[in-house]
Amino acid sequence: MWDLISPLLNQFDNAPDIIFNLLQKLSAAQIEIIVTIIRSIWKARNLKLCQQVTDSNITILERARHLLEGWRTANRKQGHLNPTASDSSPSSSNVIINANPRWKKPLRGRYKCNIDASFPTTTNKVGFGMCIRDSDGNHVRSKIMCYTPSCSVDVGEALALNHAIRWIHELQLSNVDFEVDSKRVADYFNKGRGDVTEFGSIMDSSSSFCNGYLTNSHVEFIRRQANEA
């Protein structure tokens, strides 16, 4: 790999040109490795800025390896689940599973806000990320924030939605489709009530606020692969 990178360092003077030139020469397996390492480096940069956490080179490479292994495993499982039979006659026994979900634009006149929470093991904090895009798919606003102390995954995802709803209200936007990759959060927002735990309290607050100030907005579940902001 270094034999390919070394000549590019003299040919180009910026990282994007080096990366895109490199991607044109690599095999699919090599591209997967490079992309996951770049993603892990980007995450390390965000942790440094947001949480003042410095990842070692070993941590960055290990995170990239786990990410790539998880991605490959998920795609193998989806490939096994995706039926090959024709879908010309849809029925309850012939359900096609989308093995490659993609983000979709909102309807004309609406916005879409994708939300996610992160739970780094090296710090007692939870990170929230949210991104707003319009009906043309154009980026409108993004926000990254931290919450202390650390909490359960369900509570963290609920808090992320709660902050996103209030952020949208502060921006004075309406007609917003909130997308989360936590099915429990989406199901509780749309159907649930009566949970007396911290999770239920946060979700009830989000639902009440949305019903009061964002009456033409709603929350949807989306698979994690299509929730990249």
Image: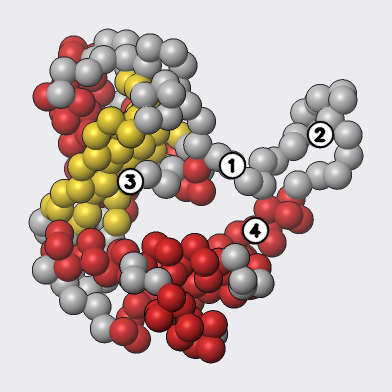
* Residue wearing tag 3: 116
**Number of marks:** 4
Q: Can residue 93 be seen in this view?
A: no
Tag 3: Cα neighbours inside 10 Å, few (<14), some, or many (≥20)? many
Color style of the picture: secondary structure
Q: What element carries label 1?
A: loop
Residue drawn at point x = 33 percent, y = 34 percent? 139
Lateral position of residue 217 relative to residue 160, left or right: right
Contact (Cβ within 8 Å) of mark 3 with mark 1: no
- Residue 101 numbered mark, or none: 1
Residue drawn at point x = 75 percent, y = 34 percent? 95
Lateral position of residue 91 relative to residue 159, left or right: right
Type of residue at label 2? Answer: Asn
Residue drawn at point x = 26 percent, y = 15 percent? 174
Q: Where's residue 86, x and y in %?
A: 88, 34
Residue drawn at point x = 46 percent, y = 85 percent? 6
The CA distance from mark 2 to mark 1 is: 18 Å
Who comes first in sequence, dot 2 or dot 1? 2
Who comes first in sequence, dot 3 or dot 1? 1
Q: Where's residue 29, x and y in %?
A: 63, 72
